[in-house]
Image (tube, coloured by chain):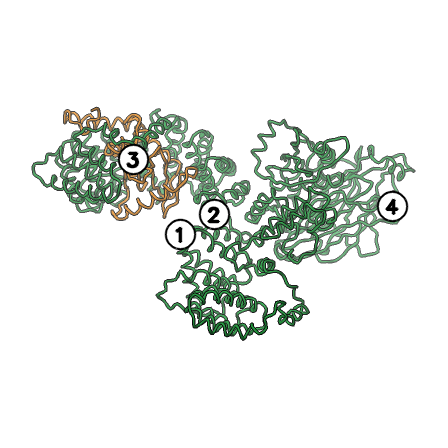
Amino acid sequence: MSDVVEKTLSALPSLLSLDSQAGAGKLSPSSKLGNLIKGITELTSKHEEETLIKKELESIKEQVASPNTTMRQMKEIMVRAIYCEMLGYQASFSYIHAIKLAQQGSVLEKRVGYLAVSLFLNETDEFLLLLVNTVLKDLQSTNLIEVCMALTVVSQMFPKDMIPAILPVVEEKLTHPKEIIRRKAVLALYKFYLIAPNQVQHIHSKFRKALCDKDPGVMTASLHIYLQLIKENPESYKDLTGSMVTILRQVVGGKLPLDFNYHSVPAPWLQIQLLRILAYLGKEDQGTSEMMYDVLEESLRRAEMNHNITYAILFECVKTIYTVHPKSQLLEKAAECIGNFVLSPKINLKYLGLKALTYVVQQDANLALPHQMTIIECLDHSDVIIKRETLELLFRITNAQNVTVIVEKMLEFLRLTYNVWFIQTMNSVFSLGGDVMQPDIPNNFLRLLAEGVDNVEDRQLRLFAVDSYVSLLQGETAKLPQRFLQVISWVLGEYSYLREEESDPGSVMRLLARLLDQRHTSTETRSWVLGAMTKLCSSPVYTAIYWQNLHCYSTERHWLYKTKCLSSLFKLYLTTLIFEVDLIISCLSWLWCCFIPQVDSSLSFLDGYVSDALAAGAAPYKSPHQRQEDLVQEKALSLEPYGLSLPVSLSSCSITDRRSPTLLSMSSGLSGNSTELSHQEGSTTLKLEGVKRVWGKDGYLAQQQSAGETPTPLVELPSPLLSPQSPPSQKPSSGLEPDQEKRQLASSLFVGLGSHNSVCLVRLPSTVWLFIKNCQSANQSNVVKSLFKPFYINSCQSALHNLLDSTTVASEGGAATTTTPQQTSQRTLDHTTSNGNPHVEGTEQRVEAGGPLSLIRGNGMVAVVPPRDLPLTSHLPAELSGLARSEFTPLCSDQDSSLALSACRVYKEDALVLLVFISNNNDSALHQMVLQLTCKELEVYIFQTGLNNKVPLFFSEIPVGRSRNQDRNTRVSSNRDLEKPRIFCESFRNFCSPPLTVSTGDYGKMWLSFSHDLKQNLRLVTTEHQEPLTATLDALKGKLHLHVVDIIGSEGIVACRLLQGPGQGQPCLLHCRVHADSLAVWLRSPVPELPDSLLYHCQKALTET
Amino acid sequence: MQFMLLFSRQGKLRLQKWYVPLSDKEKKKITRELVQTVLARKPKMCSFLEWRDLKVVYKRYASLYFCCAIENQDNELITLEIIHRYVELLDKYFGSVCELDIIFNFEKAYFILDEFLLGGEAQDTSKKNVLKAIEQADLLAEENRPRQFFFSLLS
């Protein structure tokens, strides 16, 4: 249907613009309104329209005043008057005639009269009193149409004081045989209730009757009243819950006449009304809420996603579910529903999804987590409304950890919208934040001021900034931070001209000069001030003041001043030439005495200063543009109005906290293997991309590019320009950067939500190393002698995080050991405490456990504290509990025994299982842990259970089966029949075994539905007889048991799933594409941390190959 | 609902219905600002605006913008459907409605609106009922005044 409308409507503009005759076709030639409208369409200017309408109004005035005008003519006149009013011209003289028309006209005229009244008048208008009698008369009319008209106007506007006059008649209509009258009467009463609740208090029982009306339309109308009543006083209407639930159930069940369907959805307006009522009734009332769970669930279920209207119902449903007393099962379903909104490509639904999220995160902030990436995307949405809603959402999930990031995002938004507020806020931010704030904040601020076309808005913003700074400087400046002063000077220098000259023109100059005189002003700030004054001196009045100051400060020794003075002088020279002749004379004489006698091309007069400076450790001379680069780097604020902060802004998006193995390896590749750099064209180009972005200004770009082409590795020259702020690790291949930025943003925004590490995209670098060693001196038939050697417990404090425990269990070769520890597997563990104090002291304990009896040897102290809250037996995996096993041997623990390690062996038929228990006896939860098992000759399977428990349990399996390194095994176990058992160090089995087998089609579907993704480049494995991609994927398959779904050309797709742990059975998908000589991998999974860990293992697996 | 505005792409007001008492000055100011804001929005943007302390829901049908202001707790999507239902009603009544129909017969458009929304609340959402009511009124009117329909639509 809407298509038809749109099609028809779309033909309209051409009709209108081409010829108004087309429109006139519908009107009689004599129609005055038609002529008026036609006349107006033909006009070209607002002025013409005014003249025409004035003329029209004159003629209307004349006609209404004439006694000869019939009611029929009056009706036509009234329509014209309405038209004029709509165009914005007052026709107040016609109001009284509109009332007259309603009073005296026949039905059609009355209708227009009432319409005119309702359009012209307010309910406060005194004219309305004249209408009361007419309304009363019409209400009592036998003509239904007249009654309807009277009720319609009453429900739109009626003088409050006159309600009693007509109330009995309206009440009477509640029992009228016609449902349309009843319905309008109910709505009229609703209106009365809204404007004068006391007047209708006595007829509440009649509302109930309306609620039970046999006509659904009347019942729907009565819900308006009930919504209002219940909203104001839910307690008094709890008894209605049952009825409301029943009505909703009937509606949802399709029991209403088909007339009430809207696009085949049963009475959506009614449904929404009922849902809103239920929300008010069930709020904070468990008993009442329980009555409605079923029907809410049914509403959710019935509202299939096919039309906007069902989304409207779903939205209301979700809101209700989250308002009433919670029921977890319903909440889950509702949360799922929100996902449909948020992920919808339709912008309106996305908006509502954000809104729903905003609503529900107040109850559970974690609900925002699955939609992190969508939220991040919405933050950058081009639609301000979406952006604002996203900020609203972020505001709701603000906590102590992400508050700075969120506030920054909000400010970013505000600076685009509200000028005055923005400047004021930034002023206080600068004054308070001052010198501790990131340099890019003032930088961005200045850029924002400088950017943009020179339109009125921009000028206003600048002018406001200038004005506010001038008033700031007039006050006490001693407390203002240096950075703020710098910002102020820059802005004043650039935009003071915007101030109207009626005020004292030299005031800005004098204020700046005062800054120069103040002792607390730093050297750097002074140079900024001087720069500003230089800009200002284009006006002659300023120049005199400037001149004095320049004179004073040119005698200063500081080189910054000197350079500044020199450049200032040059500019001054040029400008004064234009303005004031007498100043030039003094200027030149000053120049003469300062510089002329000393002029020599080599600037030898500076030699002494230069050598002094060099001796004092200053940097050697650099050409001006180099220096400017330096300034940009060092001072963070540039003197240039544009191109302010290219490098700084890049450094701000560095991947500082993120533990990204690839990035680290890249950086080491750049610094360590620098000689190879020039030979590997591929990697060079990659890195140069990064370099280009940092040094993309002036000549540097060209230099870097030439480095890529010529064998001379220019890049490696120790250049002073490479500031320490931009280590190579900040230059990942350009394609990855935005995504990582987003991820990083996500992790900073969503930090502090959720209780376990799934939220923590930024890993804390803390580890527990566990080395298992194979000892040759096996004394029993079964084999293994594991030495658990030192258990290093270090503690270090981090400023950001409460505590990072780096607990290391290292291994050392025993007497008979020939092996050396070799790292084979790694898992990450963070041990954080809630109280913020390190609870593991920096002591070193040595614990050895070996042999079947778990001898504890060693020369150091032995701290064996069996974990409290034993028995550990209860933590034995079910499949191992029935088997023969050794005693639980406590291995070691830290000093206050908050963390303890114990082990036991279980003898399986085909393997020896070594169980290592890590018990956390503290109250705080372990958030992450890294467990590293190292063994050269044994292979260790690690199974992990219960990461969420307070006692995480790892156990390793030592298979007695065939071994891979036959030769070595025979060597070490020569005196036994039994083969040397090997501990497989394959922690990744934990994640990805058994492989997830999916078809390409399923893969595609799954891919789209996963929200957590990660992109990274990996190195390719090269073999002689295989394609690099196939070889790499095979290697991954072999090592990690991933399932290679398909390989097409240079792309391959791989799948796996998590075997154990909190997201057990959850899949992770990889999409690999060969790009140059690296493998671009894109991982996606429903589990937030899975891509990250999988990526890590992939990297590791590939490095080992 | 607080008010409903219909305006053309050129910013010309075609219909205005206010359900809250406001002075003429305020109405004009709101109309001007809102028309400006809505016209400045791009087609891919969402149909909702947070404007002053109101929520504005708008939708464009060909060259006409339908624009409703609702209270904060109201449902935006259902408001969009109210607009759509209104267009459907107009379409049914005029038979393939176009902007010209609304320009030249704006009082009819008002009658339909009044029959559909009463005092800012959806009164009767059944298409059939609304049109029946309108037709009855029209019919009665014609009985009372044989011929001389206000606009000779057929000429």
- What color does chain B have in the rendering? orange
Q: Secondary structure at mark 1?
A: loop
- Residue matched to label 2: A391
Q: CA distance from mark 3 to mark 2?
A: 34 Å
Q: Residues within 10 Å of mark 4 (few under 14, many from 20)?
A: some
Residue type, label 2:
Leu
- Label 2, label 4: how far apart the Cα atoms are: 61 Å
Residue A786's x, y, as percent?
82, 45
The alpha-carbon separation of the residues under discs 3 and 1 comes to 43 Å
Chain bearing mark 4: A
Q: Which residue is mark 3?
A: B117
- Chain designation of label 1: A
Front of the two marks 1 and 2? 1
Mark identifier at residue A672:
none
Q: For the residue marked with disc 3, what is the amino acid?
A: Leu
* Residue position marked by numbered label 1 in the rendering: A455
The residue lying toward the viewer, choosing from A608 and A425, is A608
Tell me which residue sits at (51%, 55%) in the image.
Answer: A642
Do residues under tags 4 and 1 come within 8 Å of each other at their CB atoms?
no
Q: Secondary structure at mark 3?
A: strand
Q: Nearer the viewer, residue A367 or A328?
A: A367
